[in-house]
Image: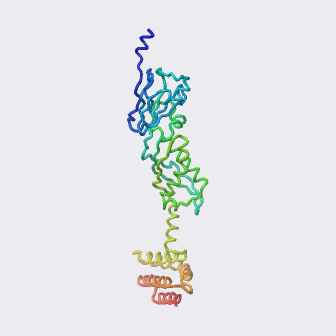
Amino acid sequence: MGIFNFLKKQFIDVIEWPESPEGVLVNQYPMQDREIQTGAQLTVRDTQFALFVNEGKIADVFGPGLHTLNTRTLPLLTNLMNWDKAFANPFKSDVYFFSTREQLDQKWGTTNPITIRDKEMGPIRVRANGAFSYKIAEPKKFYQKVGGTRPTYTATELEGQLRSIILTQMASHFGGAEVGFIDMAANQQKFSDTLRGAITPAFADYGLALQTFFVQSITLPEELQTYFDKAASMRMVGDLGRYTQFQTADSIATAAANPNGNASVGAGLGAGMAMGSQMAAAMSGSFGAGAGGGAKDDVMASIQKLHDLMKNGVLTQAEFDAKKAELLKKIT
């Protein structure tokens, strides 16, 4: 009976994995009750590793190529099983294939805002998202820390873990670094490279190589975005005095042009009287002694604004002439 059972045994003489379907990172070769024949051929494709495990212990790892299995090509497994040099019998061992293909277009994003230390604003909270790619670089480490003895392991199953790694490393990096939001938004490639450097070691701990990492968008809470927009406007206009002068003159003209009759005239006069001293102070600071051609241009622009106000009935001819003379003194 024993001899009959032995004759029924099936021996494996070719071991390979066609690597299908897509997205499978690890696949266990189906051993069932079969044994590997001495001298069997192991085919490992260019984008694969093959890992031999004996009774739960990692033995040999094979890279791409065609391998004939014997004591010379299985030194660690030979040692674990106490074979002598005359090894010629079939043997049992679990064989796992690992795909080393680059897993492209993986998405990441902040579920909650991350606090960064902005160089100008101090601690602020931002959201970000982007894409990355990775591949298995060290099958032993991946087997020990991620895949284990599971017959298959897919990229989909790994998504949540990788996102957690990325967000944890980002939070740790920003917690100890002082950065500028404006700098990050202006140079996303440099920002992407910086984050990739911070995240790469964490991927390596799992036997993975982070191939690419991209930041595709960075956003602020609405109130902070409004602040940055105002700050940018002030830098575009010039100093604070010129910004105040610009807003004062613009608001007076807008109120005067409002088609609501006398109410609009009153609103225009009120706005002009309320901010008249601010405008005068701003002009005084801008058009002081030694001012160049830029100051002259500003004076002429202000006179034009005042002329428009006179035409709209907000100022009288006498008021316009007096203000015009005052402005012209600044550049004479």
The image shows residue 225, relative to residue 159, as above or below, that is below
Using the rendered view, name the quadrant where residue 286 is placed.
bottom right
Q: How far across and how far down the image is residue 166, in percent? A: 52, 47
In the foreground, 98 or 258: 98
The image shows residue 225, relative to residue 252, as above or below, that is above
Is 199 placed left or right of 45 in the picture?
right
In the foreground, 102 or 15: 15
The chosen color scheme is rainbow
In the foreground, 253 or 328: 328
Q: How far across and how far down the image is residue 320, in percent? A: 47, 87
The residue under the point 47% across, 45% down is: 134
The N terminus is located in which quarter? Answer: top left
Using the rendered view, name the quadrant where residue 34 is placed.
top left
The residue under the point 55% across, 50% down is: 198
In the foreground, 47 or 299: 47
The image shows residue 224, relative to residue 36, as above or below, that is below
Q: How far across and how far down the image is residue 178, in percent? A: 59, 58
Q: Residue furthest front?
A: 85
Is 71 placed left or right of 122 in the picture?
left
Q: Residue furthest top?
A: 1
Q: Give the total of numbered labels.
A: 0
Q: How far across and how far down the image is residue 125, in percent? A: 55, 55
